[in-house]
Amino acid sequence: MIELNNADLKVQINPDGAELSSVKEQSENLEYMWQADPKFWGRHAPVLFPIVGRLKDDHYTVAGQSYKMTQHGFARDQTFKVVSHDATSAIFELVADDATKAMYPFDFKLQLRYTLEGHMLTVIYHVENPDAEATLPFSIGGHPAFNVPLGPNEGGFEDYQITVAPKKTYPQIPLIGPYNDAQHEKELNLTTPLQLDHDLFNQDALILDLNQVETTVMLSSTLNDHGVALTLAQAPYVGIWSPYPKQAPFVCIEPWWGIADNLTADGELTHKQAIQQLAPNTQFEAAYQLRFF
């Protein structure tokens, strides 16, 4: 594990998947991150690249050739190189090789940069297209999971709430199975906090269409002052998820620059909804911030 420390937080990141695995409050030793109990879900905060969500039949096509890729892509199962590391920051890197090209026939360089400052952890995604001629189609996102409740004396699942700023009614993209049904968009009133209940997730994730407006999604206890707030700018979507009907003791807040295939997807990667198109020899950068309190 790569460890970041300051007076407020101790953070652990696993080079396997460049996965944020632990965030503990120093004075109370309070663990914010879900600890990957496989009974419910065996991950902490996987990196979603080069797709977000599920492809139709787990396949896509490029230049007439079909490729197989499972849900959320392969980055979460790769070991990243540790490029740099000090007390409060670390950079992890994954580059294309023969194994990735068997699933995804593109050159790329992906970096994750973690920076700790006070009670804030900033996560930056940096994608480079080193090809001098070909455009790089990709999606990227996060899947951090937070303990609910945060500790043994922190109440139950229903004692927590989701608050979204700006407060308004958001377009909500429904899921039909693992695929998005954006043609039948709903509305979710978030002018007031959303009380947690496992039945909220009986149709899988709640997906908010953010229209790339800076948004903060806060998960907090109604019994005390503990919680976590995720802020993202210029992201098209955020997903809020907990496994159903398992009644799992965690909730994910997921910043997405991409989305699962639409019900009408034709399988062509460049046609995929919300796919990023990175021009030759250019770079893409996106970020989110986590504030723990």
Image: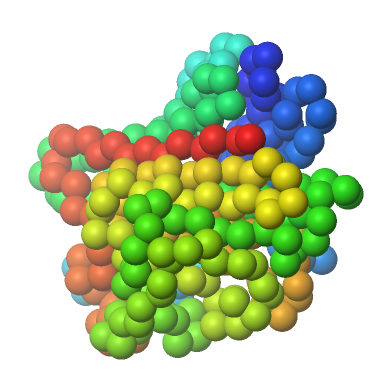
- Estimate the x, y position of residue 245 in percent, counting from the top left: 71, 80
- Estimate the x, y position of residue 180 in percent, counting from the top left: 38, 79
- Estimate the x, y position of residue 171 in percent, counting from the top left: 32, 72
Identified at 61% across, 12% down, the residue is: 87
Identified at 22% across, 35% down, the residue is: 283
Identified at 70% across, 24% down, the residue is: 10
Residue 167 visible in the shown view = yes
Q: On the picture, is 35 further left or further right than 120?
A: right
86 and 158: which one is in front?
Answer: 158
Q: Please state, as top left, top right, bottom left or bottom right, where the N terminus lies in the image.
A: top right
88 and 62: which one is in front?
Answer: 88
Q: Please state, as top left, top right, bottom left or bottom right, where the C terminus lies in the image.
A: top right
The colour scheme used here is: rainbow
**110 over 236 or under it: above or below:** above
The part of the image, by quadrant, that contains residue 168 is bottom left
**265 over 9 or under it: above or below:** below
- Estimate the x, y position of residue 194 in percent, counting from the top left: 55, 66
293 and 273: which one is in front?
Answer: 293
The part of the image, by quadrant, that contains residue 271 is bottom left
Q: Residue furthest left?
A: 133
**181 over 274 or under it: above or below:** below
* Total number of numbered discs in the rendering: 0
